[in-house]
Every structure is written in structure tokens, then in C-alpha cells.
Amino acid sequence: MKRVYLIIAVLFTLVACSEKGKQFSVTSLYKKTIYSGDTISFEITSKKNIVPDSVVIMVDGQSFSYINTTCVLPTDNLQMGEKTLSIYTYRKGKKEVNLRSMRILSDLVPAQLKYEVVATYNHDKQSYTQGLQYENGYFYESAGLYDESSLRYVDAKSGKVLRKQMLDSVYFAEGITLVGDSLFQLTWREQTGFIYNKRTFEQIGSFSYPTEGWGMCYNGTHLIVSDGSEYLYFYDPKTMALHHKIAVYDNLGAVSRLNELEFVQGFVYANIYTTDKIVKINPSNGKVAAEIDFTNLLPQQLSEDVDVLNGIAWNPTNDHFYVTGKLWPRLYEVRLYFQE
């Protein structure tokens, strides 16, 4: 249901934009908490009762035009998160600009997915798992920590490491993903990524990025990268040019500490660092569609000297997921389902 807020209050006026000497002022007609799909309004007024010729609101690269003094702005197609709105008021060839800010939350309450453990496999307890990718009965795994970072090729059923490529000690390995016959790997704070031949692990390229590197997946068009914040970054894998980014939100606020990523049937699944939770994200708008709580997945008797849940891989042949953690001795094949 769409809501129209008519509480008159000037909210979130940016200090940098002084309104002294301007013909027009802008009154925000909305509450602090705005959900995607809400309709919000702005009233354009003047002490001299001057009526603007037109008004244009710019937000998220979109423009909305008005000829009335009450400007109704839909939020259906706006991204989640903090927004700065530029409100342009035109009168006899002159333009004034007022800035307003707002924060849009998701209108969805995340569904709670359940899981069933289908199988349990051995996992190298020396692997500080940062990235996991499944293909045809094998895992590509990225293990982190300085002086210990590596890229691995692992037999899924036995957990045996069949191939291992160490990284230079100055790099802390992070997320990985497959793009055709190439394997992309991030590093944490070094702002450097590597590209390998997936069959030989020969390094065939490198790339840079301006943030920390945490998780990565591929949607068939873009590399999707997390940096520990609430943002997902979409890069062109050929040029590593940033195409766009989105903020991830649920109905309560920003969902940060996004870590290991996996792209599955149009959605991004992400580990939430330091928790036992994985969230399912709609990459078109940043809304969290569902979440899965894996608390107690690893039995207490096996949890000594382990770190947090991390690592998501998907098997397209049976729609099962594989999950593990940093320094975990086990890897689990699970089936996700909605609780009736």
C-alpha cells in the first residue's frame, strides 16, 4: 500500500545549501522513515506569493518535472538508502536549487528460509575460507590470511586439495568467482585482484579497485563485489570499470558487513560477517528478500578454534547450496526451503 505523508516540517536541510536571498523555499511533507513505494511530497512556497514556472527534482540520476507548487515524488523505482535530492525551481529564466535528503528503507520484511542438511563433507581446517565456487563436482576455494593466502582446487566429496597456488605474503586473499574459463580473485586491503586460468591456475591478468575487497560473484554481465559495507559494486569484467552500485536494505535499515557472495537464479546470496546469517538480495533494487540463520550448523564438539560462517556455493544440477566457515573442519550441502 502506498502512503502519502502530510506532516509539514522542513527536514534534513543541508547546511551547505543556504536558502537566504532565495525567492522560493521548499517544505518537505514526509516523515523521517520512508519505505520503498511510499509517495512523498514537497511544497514550493514564496513570501511574495510568486508562483514558479516549473519545478524539477533530480534524484538517483532520474528527473521528475512539475508545473504545480505541490510536487509528489514516487519512490517505487528509487534505490534504497541515503538520497540527496536536488530541487530546481524555475521562474522567468532564472533557476534556484534547494537540496533535501531522505533515507529509503525496503518495504519488504525478509522471508525466513529454513535449511535441511543433505550431506556433510570434510573441509581443510587450515583453510580460512574467503571465497567458494562449485563446478562439476569440484570447488574453487580462496583461503585468506597474510602469509597463508592461497587459491585451491578441491574435490567436493572428499575435501582433498588437488591443486594449490600460494599468493605473495603481502596479499590477503578474499572472494573469487568464475567468468568463463577465467577465475577472478580479490584481495582484502591491497586493492588488487588477480585473474587465473581456471585449469592451470596460471595468472593471466590483474586488476585494481578503489575499495576493500571482500566477496565477489558474477551475474553473467557484471562482477558484483562487496567491501564490508552495505554496498554492492557492479564492475565490467573486461575493463573493471564501475558500472553502478546499490545499497542493500531491509525494512529496518542498511544491511552491512556483506561478505562472501554467490549469484543464484537472479539473486545475490551474501554472508553477513561475524554472524551465522546469509541474506538473499534482489540486485535490481538492493532489497533483502529472505534470510537464513545457520546457527548451530557446525556441532559444538567441532567448533574449537574455528572462525565465523563464510563460504557459499551453489550446485545448479540439484539447486543445493554448499556452506562452510573459516577454519571449519566440515562443509555442508543443504537444501533451502520456505517454512510452511
Image (spheres, rainbow, N blue to C red):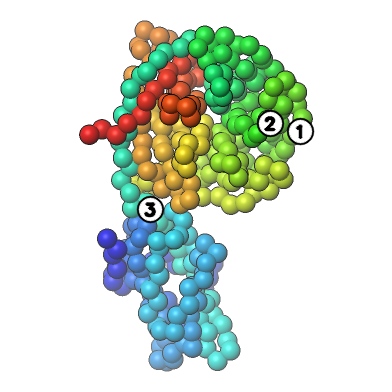
Numbered mark located on residue 182 in the image: 2
Query: What is the distance, in whole Å, between disc 2 and disc 1 at their CAs?
Result: 10 Å
User: Are the residues tagged 2 and 3 within 8 Å (C-beta)?
Assistant: no
Tell me: residue 12, above or below residue 238.
Answer: below
The kind of secondary structure element at disc 1 is: strand
Residue 149 location (% of width, % of height): 64, 20
Amino acid type, callout 2? Ser
Mark closer to the chain start, 2 or 1: 2
Asked if residue 289 is positioned above or below residue 166 in the image, the reply reads below
Task: Of the two numbered discs 2 and 3 on the same chain, state the one appearing first in sequence.
Answer: 3
Q: Of the numbered discs in the image, which one, if any, rests on residue 205?
A: 1
Q: Position of residue 195 (x, y in %)?
A: 71, 31
Cα separation between marks 2 and 3: 37 Å
Mark 1 or mark 3, which is nearer the start of the sequence? Answer: 3
Q: Position of residue 230 (x, y in %)?
A: 48, 43
Q: Residue farthest to the left?
A: 340
